Image: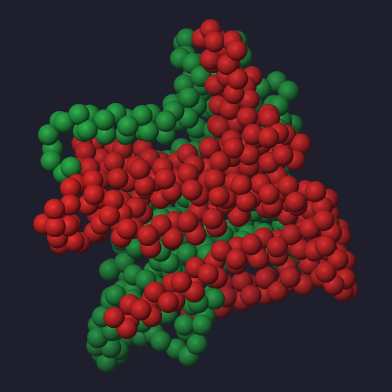
């Protein structure tokens, strides 16, 4: 009896994964059917413009969002580490977006970034009528509105981890650097920041994982638009499964998402394994 | 660098943090202000502005007045749905996670590491990989488009997190404590009840806050498995924006957004320390 919940959880993870993978190889459309079509669904998804745009967007969004939120998080952590007053209040402010749903965040940013009612309208009303900030409705720039909202929402996470890392730097190392004649800036740059790189990798992996499965935020902010300019893999999956009733292709797109995720997670798992072995040998 | 004097560099630091803080607070402030402006006032100007007079009526309308998809009951039924999903799923997944975490960490059995490893894979497996199987399972057991269907999903999937949190906490409890109790004749549940549970409040608070926040904010399953009057508040907000796209009611919508975000925001304000602990524990796995 005690093991039932654990077994149920483990069983659903394995069986659901296999189930979805199986569906991706069947000719299922409106309902799941048996049969075998090989890689036909995968080829169809990979050849579709929807997926290609989604994949390019994911590359851009993933890289830009992860790098910028790392930098923002690190800057915030370094600033908060300077023993400033009101640190608790500031930390609360930088982290509160994480407690709010992406639907709420996306909705609010869609208002702020909407040129008709948001920042552009405000600046126009203030008298600068040639001001332009229409990224939300601009095909080429719309993906950056998602980057902005995502950074706003989750750079606090990077900050929290970096801050914990900065606070746990061994005081002896800092003292040793100072005895060696290193100035405060040099100590920071050469001694303290390098200790953060394992945390950096963790932050990158967690943020990439978020980027790969991003759905709510995009749904609320741009809904993939204008047109399909801000399409992302998770939206393609949903669209194929529940709007176009292409279950086989939807499952194939979901498996492709999983493969992208594995391309990030497997190297990370290997790296963690090596680290742990080194730690036990040392 | 580490002195407390007010050198120019310190002033610069304060200036930069203040600017950052303003940027992080701005969207919240904008929505709060808009929730107190009338729709007409917003339509004449922009979303960003100071209320001319406080339109508290927005909240009444958002709570129980405006119409989503032909039903004019405001956001209240959907908030209620979210509560009816989130509260049971949080309790079930936390309790089951505590027992399971206790079992895995202190009652070794054959294959326990394997099972535990598989369960924690649930932290990574994309939801999209489970959407179709859940659809079929929910339909077969008659729980599609019901609140209990979502409770079931969130309980089973939440276990990945709750077991991880509790297991990592219980693993630090000395085995001798358990061995001594077993020699005295105490069984699995007796030890859990008498020894483990009284030690657990910090981790249970972390787990409850984490689960509540995640389930309340969840959208994909809500929008996939429920329709109309059964939807949780996140899905209803999206439906609301779509429904009023022609004639936006930004004042009322802002009030609805605030109401939807309030439960998790309050939990964060009062339990922030535990919230952050869950965040970092979930990340460092």
Q: Is residue A155 left or right of residue A75?
A: right
x then y, percent, for residue A114: 62, 25
Q: Is residue B41 left or right of residue B28?
A: right
Q: Is residue B177 above or below residue A198?
A: below
Q: Specify whether residue B181 is in view.
A: no
Residue ID at (13%, 41%) = B3
x then y, percent, for residue B158: 52, 63
Q: Nearer the viewer, residue B219 or A56?
A: A56
Q: Nearer the viewer, residue B277 or B158?
A: B277
Chain with green colouring: B
Q: How many numbered marks have been drawn onto this rendered protein structure? A: 0
Q: Is residue B92 above or below residue A167?
A: below
Q: Residue furthest front?
A: A181
Q: Specify whether residue B247 is in view.
A: yes
Residue ID at (16%, 44%) = B2
Residue ID at (28%, 84%) = B175
x then y, percent, for residue B177: 25, 82
- Quadrant in the picture for the C terminus of chain A: bottom left
Q: Is residue B76 left or right of residue A278?
A: right
Q: Residue furthest top?
A: A127
Q: Is residue A201 above or below residue A52?
A: below
Residue ID at (42%, 30%) = B23
Look at chain A in the picture and name its colour.
Answer: red
């Amino acid at each position: 009896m005690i093991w039932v919940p654990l077994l149920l959880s483990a069983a659903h993870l394995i069986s659901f994964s296999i189930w979805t993978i199986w569906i991706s190889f069947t000719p299922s459309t409106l309902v799941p059917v048996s049969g075998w079509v090989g890689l036909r669904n995968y080829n169809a998804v990979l050849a579709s413009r929807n997926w290609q745009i989604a994949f390019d967007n994911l590359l851009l969004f993933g890289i830009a969002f992860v790098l910028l939120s790392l930098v923002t998080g690190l800057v915030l952590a370094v600033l908060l580490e300077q023993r400033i007053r009101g640190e608790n209040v500031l930390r609360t402010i930088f982290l509160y977006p994480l407690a709010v749903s992406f639907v709420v965040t996306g909705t609010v940013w869609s208002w702020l970034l909407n040129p008709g009612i948001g920042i552009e309208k405000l600046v126009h009303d203030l008298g600068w009528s040639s001001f332009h900030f229409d990224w939300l409705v601009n095909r080429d720039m719309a993906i950056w509105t998602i980057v902005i909202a995502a950074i706003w929402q989750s750079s606090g996470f990077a900050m929290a981890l970096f801050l914990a890392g900065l606070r746990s730097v061994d005081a002896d190392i800092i003292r040793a650097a100072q005895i060696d004649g290193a100035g405060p800036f040099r100590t920071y740059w050469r001694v303290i920041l390098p200790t953060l790189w394992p945390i950096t990798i963790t932050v990158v992996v967690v943020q990439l994982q978020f980027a790969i499965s991003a759905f709510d935020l995009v749904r609320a902010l741009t809904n993939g638009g204008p047109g399909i300019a801000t399409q992302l893999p998770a939206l393609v999956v949903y669209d194929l499964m529940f709007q176009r009733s292409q279950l086989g292709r939807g499952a194939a797109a979901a498996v492709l998402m999983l493969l992208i995720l594995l391309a990030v997670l497997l190297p990370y798992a290997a790296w963690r394994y090596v680290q742990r072995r080194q730690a036990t040998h040392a | 660098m580490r002195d407390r004097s007010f050198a120019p560099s310190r002033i610069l630091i304060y200036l930069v943090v203040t600017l950052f803080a303003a940027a992080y607070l701005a969207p919240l402030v904008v929505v709060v202000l808009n929730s107190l402006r009338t729709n007409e006032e917003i339509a004449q100007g922009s979303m960003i502005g100071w209320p001319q007079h406080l339109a508290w009526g927005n909240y009444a309308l958002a709570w129980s007045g405006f119409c989503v998809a032909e039903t004019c009951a405001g956001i209240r039924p959907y908030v209620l749905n979210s509560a009816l999903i989130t509260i049971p799923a949080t309790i079930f997944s936390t309790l089951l996670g505590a027992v399971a975490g206790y079992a895995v960490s202190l009652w070794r059995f054959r294959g326990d590491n394997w099972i535990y490893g598989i369960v924690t894979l649930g932290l990574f497996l994309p939801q999209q990989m489970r959407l179709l199987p859940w659809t079929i399972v929910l339909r077969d057991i008659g729980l599609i488009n019901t609140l209990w269907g979502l409770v079931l999903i969130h309980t089973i999937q939440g276990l990945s997190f709750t077991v991880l949190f509790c297991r990592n906490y219980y693993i630090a409890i000395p085995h001798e404590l358990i061995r001594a109790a077993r020699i005295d004749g105490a069984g699995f549940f007796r030890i859990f009840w008498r020894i483990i549970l009284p030690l657990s409040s910090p981790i249970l608070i972390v787990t409850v806050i984490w689960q509540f926040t995640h389930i309340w904010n969840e959208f994909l399953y809500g929008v996939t498995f429920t329709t109309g009057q059964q939807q949780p508040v996140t899905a209803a907000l999206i439906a609301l924006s779509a429904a009023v796209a022609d004639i936006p009611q930004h004042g009322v919508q802002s009030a609805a957004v605030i109401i939807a975000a309030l439960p998790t925001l309050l939990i964060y304000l009062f339990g922030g320390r535990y919230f952050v602990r869950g965040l970092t524990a979930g990340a460092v796995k």
